[in-house]
């Protein structure tokens, strides 16, 4: 899933979320570093409609590398560093 052209976008999102305050500085719906970022913010950075960003983010949540949290009416997304490390170890072992 991460080796397809769309997967490159997902990897890009994961990279941005390493330091969300740098990549999403406005944080109009909370603190990007503490709360995470919204699909709308990711969509704006990718230059795609929000539903496209939501699909990417949803897949990353489904495989466990992102966590989502509802704050008011917006869902915010953050990296799950523990799960990312587990997935990286699986790939290192040739899985």
Image (spheres, rainbow, N blue to C red):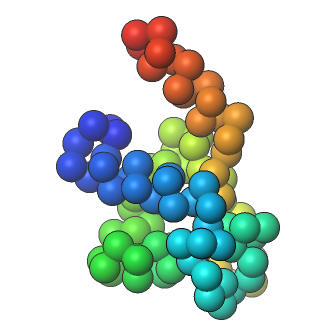
Name the residue located 67 percent from the left edge and 67 percent from the top edge. 36
Q: Where is residue 89, by image quadrant?
A: top right
x and y percentages locating residue 63 in the rendered image: 51, 39
Residue in front for this viewpoint, 54 or 89: 89
Left or right, residue 90 beside residue 28: left
Left or right, residue 35 beside residue 86: right
Give the answer, above or below, for where 21 lies relative to 93.
below
Left or right, residue 10 beside residue 39: left
Name the residue located 54 percent from the left edge and 27 percent from the top edge. 87
Furthest residue toward left = 5
x and y percentages locating residue 30 in the rendered image: 74, 82
Left or right, residue 49 beside residue 36: left
Give the answer, above or below, for where 2 lies relative to 72.
above
Quarter of the picture holding the C terminus: top left
Count of marks placed on residues = 0
Residue in front for this viewpoint, 32 or 51: 32
User: Is there any visible trace of residue 62 in the rendered image?
Assistant: yes
Name the residue located 39 percent from the left edge and 61 percent from the top edge. 55
Quarter of the picture holding the N terminus: top left
Furthest residue toward right = 34
x and y percentages locating residue 25 in the rendered image: 61, 82
Furthest residue toward front = 22
Residue in front for this viewpoint, 70 or 45: 45
Give the answer, above or below, for where 36 lies relative to 66.
below
Name the residue located 61 percent from the left edge and 67 percent from the top edge. 20
User: Is there any visible trace of residue 76 in the rendered image?
Assistant: no
Q: Where is residue 24, by image quadrant?
A: bottom right
């Amino acid at each position: 899933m991460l080796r397809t052209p769309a997967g490159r976008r997902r990897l890009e999102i994961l990279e941005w979320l390493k330091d969300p305050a740098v990549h999403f500085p406005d944080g109009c719906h909370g603190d990007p570093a503490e709360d995470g970022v919204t699909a709308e913010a990711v969509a704006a950075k990718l230059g795609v409609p929000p539903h496209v960003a939501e699909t990417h983010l949803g897949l990353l949540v489904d495989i466990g590398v992102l966590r989502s949290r509802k704050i008011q009416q917006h869902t915010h997304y953050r990296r799950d560093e523990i799960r990312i490390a587990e997935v990286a170890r699986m790939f290192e072992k040739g899985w």
